[in-house]
Structures are given as structure tokens and as C-alpha cells.
Image (cartoon, rainbow, N blue to C red):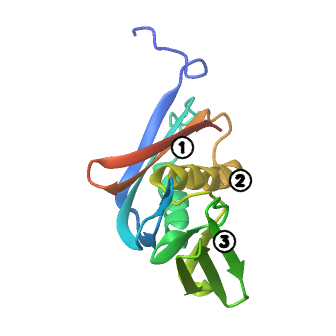
Amino acid sequence: MPNQPSSRSSCHAVTVERQRLRFAAGHFATFADELEPIHGHNYDVFVEVIGPLTDESWVIDFSLLKRLTREVCETLDHKFLLQMDSRTLSITDDDTHFLIQYRDELSYRLPKHDVAALPIDNSTAERLSQYIAGQLIESLQDSAPTGLARLRVGVEEMPGQAAWFETDI
């Protein structure tokens, strides 16, 4: 039998993507001195987990990783993605609505039940991938095998246009 690499010194990677790992949401991003008009995307999510093999010869159970990712996607689906840490927007919570002010130019009043209030500074695909990664890390720490090394999350706004965030677990 040929020598096989030790599963403890090597890392493997698994990915889950698309299928039911998607969400539709509205948003506007701020760029320099501009605020995009409200618009939406059908976002696709990609997740890669890197780590050693378990005793059962897998990095993580695909169905667990898909379930955890789907749970995050469901919190964003059919919501307005609001960047609560914006440096450009003034946001007030009146208990039933978010009041959003962009300079003296535009104001919005959105019902809270239609909003995903996110702890990000801008609702870009880059920040969404980072947010999803953070949510997944919390879930993985509770239910995944020990020893996972890295997590990489991609958020695709439209075919061919995606942003990625990668971090140690």
C-alpha cells in the first residue's frame, strides 16, 4: 500500500455553494460622496472550510455546513440590508421603524420587520461576506469538529461579480 499523507498534518477543504444557499435582498451602498438608489440582488453564497480530516475522514459534514449557511441566509432573505455602522447615514430606531437620513438630501422610513440591521459599515458584498463568515464561525464553534483552520465565504451579487472574506477559525 503506498504511503498516505497523515491526516493530522495535512489540511483538506470542502465547499458548499448556491442551491439553497442564497437570498434575495434590497440595499443601498455608499461610495465616496454618493448613495446608491435602493435596489436588490439575488445573492448566491459560497463557503469553503479548511481543516484536517476527522477520524471519519471528512473535514465537516456537508449537511451541517449547508444547514448553518442556510440559516444565516434565511435571516437576510427578503429583507432590506441596513448598514448600522455607516459613517455616512444617520439611523434612528423608533421601536417600529428605522429612520435613515442621508445628509439633508434623502430620508427613508422602513418597518423594522422588513430590515436586517447588520453591524457593518456598508452593505457591500465584501462586508456581507465578512458578516456571514462571522455568523458561521459562531455556529461552527458550537457544532463542528474541532481543529478547523480557515473559513472562506463568497457573496455573489450577480453572475461573475463576487466578493470574498477569508479568516482563521
Q: How many marks?
A: 3
Q: Residue at x 42, y 43 (%)?
A: 15
Q: Quadrant location of residue 122?
A: bottom right
The amino acid on which the numbered mark 2 sits, given as a three-letter code, is Asp
Front residue of 117 and 67:
117
Q: Which mark is residue 90?
A: 3
Q: Which mark is residue 79?
A: none
- Dot 1: few (<14), some (14–19), or many (≥20) neighbours within 10 Å? many
Q: Which mark is residue 142?
A: 2
Front residue of 33 and 13:
33
Task: Give the percent coordinates (x, y) of residue 12.
Answer: 48, 29
Q: Which mark is residue 60?
A: 1
The amino acid on which the numbered mark 1 sits, given as a three-letter code, is Ile
Q: Secondary structure at mark 3?
A: strand
55 lies above or below 157? above
Quadrant including the N terminus: top left
Q: Secondary structure at mark 2?
A: helix
Q: Earlier in the sequence, mark 3 or mark 2?
A: 3
Of tags 1 and 3, the one toward the viewer is 3
Of tags 3 and 2, the one toward the viewer is 3
169 lies above or below 142? above
- Dot 3: few (<14), some (14–19), or many (≥20) neighbours within 10 Å? some
Front residue of 144 and 108:
108
The amino acid on which the numbered mark 3 sits, given as a three-letter code, is Ser
